[in-house]
Structure formats: structure tokens, C-alpha cells
Image (cartoon, rainbow, N blue to C red):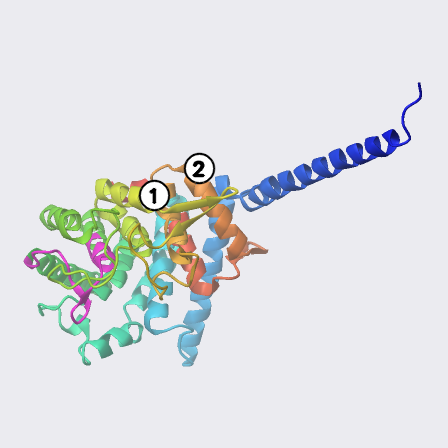
Amino acid sequence: MGSSPGAPRRMYRHRRLIAITLGVVAALAVVAVLPRWWCGRDADEWYRGEAGRVRGLAEELVAFEAADDERRASGTGGGLAEMWGLLAHQMTALGLAQICVDHPDWRERYAPIATRAAAKSLLPEMRSEFTSAWYGRDGMAELDSPDGHAYLSYPALALGMARWVDPAFPPDLAASHDALIASYERRLLASPTALLDTFPGRAYPTDVAAVAAAIAVHGRVTGVDHSAVLAHWARQVRAVQIDHDTGLVVQRMGVDGTAQDAPRASGTGLAAYFAGFADQALARELAASLFAQERNILGFSAIHEYGDGYDGAGDMDSGPLVLGISISATGFALAPARAFGHRDMFTRLFRTTDLFGLPVQSGARTRFASGGVIGNALLLAFLTSGPELAR
């Protein structure tokens, strides 16, 4: 008996359905695999601190500092001032100094530039926003004051790192650095909560973590024993500044320890980086809580800003939030992921950084085009962060 007239048509439809299904499966496989491969192709080299990757981004920041020097010498002023200038110069100094720690043979090239960047982070125009908030009182002129002025921790840490790696660190900067650290040590020991206000009545645990980092690095550079103040700070971080349900640090507090904001990932991420200079056990605890905020889609990871039970909007600390995801916290998480050996986490975070950062190679220089100078300075610091800094 012959087959029915409809059999060939049914067979054709069946084969066509199989072909479409295989095509969809193949397309999904490409979508799932190709982007994560492409955006993660350099992750392992960054994780290992491969010289070509590190130097490319370092040279981009060297060019920024050179252009800034030229503008200042010509009388036209630097390219960045106030808070953004402070952050750009400070993070450039940290990144270059960290490179010098990893690659001592590069110190001749990068240590003097780290010192110049650190010195610029201490210029009065870099803290004008804070001086205005303190009713015109400059923190560097009030080192005997009981007020916190915790924002000065950023140049203090930059100065310490530059002083560590630069044999020609200027004596006048060293004297300013010593005086600032002595002031911070006195203020922290006098604070029952180990909180210092950045603005009047507003303390940010992240900024105080930078204070602790600056004190720790000063001890490494000078041999001064700061163990008592660092132990006090670490105890009060655990007792007062961390939300015990989420493990995240509270973003903003009163100096008495009263919460003024929610526990958030962006503050925790940056605090984990700073804590790595001062107390590795605490830094690991903060990193673990930060990593618990990970959201992973097809091998691309990002960090959710608010812990369970909390919600809110984005701001300058977190960056714009998309479905609760913080751009800043995602970038900050690169540092503890690398420093504490979380290779897989680092790779997933780097894929996201590569996807949205748009890395561009230009000769011997590398930059992440979407972040501008500040983004590149931050990434230089975070991508070169390592556990040796807290030894």
C-alpha cells in the first residue's frame, strides 16, 4: 500500500519544526556564550595583574595628570576641582602606588606621578564643597578641632600610599601627612562609635573606613604603632556601623550611631576596599555581605544596592539604579573580589564592566570610554587592589 497524500507534507512540517528548533537553540547558545566570552576575554589578565593591561590604564591616567599639570602651569587651572577632582587625583595616586607595590621596577616611572596626584588631592579647591558645608572652616586649618572633617581621609590615604613608594616624597607633604594622621587618631579614639562627621552632623562609615586606611598606611610608612585606634575602629564598625540583618554598612549616620540612611552596597563596597588596608578580617566580612548582593544574568554580574527589607532611590554614591542595580557598587566590588581571590566573581563583574565601560585601546594607552577620567581612576585603583596592601 502507498503512503497517504498528506504524509510528505507532515514529514516536511516535522523536519521544518526540527530545523527551527535547532536554529533557536543555536541562537540562544550564541547569545548565552558569545557575549560573556567577548566581554570576559581580558578578565584573567586583569585578575593576574598582567603588565600590558595594567600599564595601558596607568598610562591613560599619567596622561591625565600631565595635562592637568600643564593647565595649572599655564594659569588656566586644572581640569577638575571640588569633589570630582579630589576623587580623580586621589584614586589615580592609589592606583599608581599599588602598581609600584606590585612592580617595584616601575617605581621610577609612576611613584613621582603618584606623589603629584596625591598632593593635588590636598589642594584647597578640591575640598571647597566641604569647606562651604562647614561654614567656611577649612579642615586642614582645624586639625586641633573636635570636628571630624572625615573627607580629608581621601587625600590622607593618597599621601600615605605615595609616601610609601616614592623615595623622594617631599618633607613638607610628609609633615602635613603626619599632622593630619595624628589629628584623625585623636578624633577616632575620642569617638565612642568610631564615627567622624564628613559634613556637620553627617557621618559616612565609608569615609571613616578611609580614615582607618590612611592611619594604617601611615603606620606602615613611618613605623608608628596605630594598633589601638585601628582596633577601636574595627570593633565599632562591627558593633555600630553594620546592619546585622544584611551585613551591609549603613550609608549615613549621626556621630552618635543613629542611622540616617539604609544599609547599602555602594558604601559597603568602597568600605571593603578601604578596610583592606587596615583590617583584612573585617574587609573579608564586608566583602562577603557585598557579594551576597550579586545578581547574575548569563555570566554578567552586578550588585544590588539595597539589602532585603530596604529600598530607595539612587544618588551620587550609588549612581543611577536600574532595577535596583548600582553601577558604583558593581565597580567597587572588583577590588575585594581580586584582593581576596574570588576569581569567578571577579570575572563575572569584569564582564559587566567591559560591556558598559567600553574599553578603548589607543597606542600604549587603554581607557574605559564611558566613565571618563574619574571612572578610569577608580578602575585603576580597583583593578590593581591586592591583599599585600594590608600586610
Residue 283 or residue 388, whichever sits in front = 283
Q: Is residue 322 above or below residue 72?
A: above
Q: Nearer the viewer, mark 2 or mark 1?
A: 1
Disc number for residue 323: none
The residue segment tinted magenta is 190-212
Determine which quarter of the picture holds residue 70: bottom left
SS label for mark 2 = helix
Task: Return the disc, 2 or 1, that comes first in the chain's sequence.
Answer: 1
Q: Quadrant of the N terminus?
A: top right
Read off the residue under disc 1: 292
| Residue occupying image coordinates x 42% and y 63% | 320
| Residue occupying image coordinates x 48% and y 54% | 57
Q: Position of residue 367 (x, y in %)?
A: 51, 57
Looking at the rendered structure, the kind of residue marked 2 is Asp
SS label for mark 1 = loop
Tell me how far mark 2 sits from mark 1, CA to CA: 14 Å
Determine which quarter of the picture holds residue 113: bottom left
Looking at the rendered structure, the kind of residue marked 1 is Ala
Q: Quadrant of the C terminus?
A: top left
277 on left or right of 187: right
Residue 151 or residue 216, whichever sits in front = 151
The outermost residue toward the top is 1
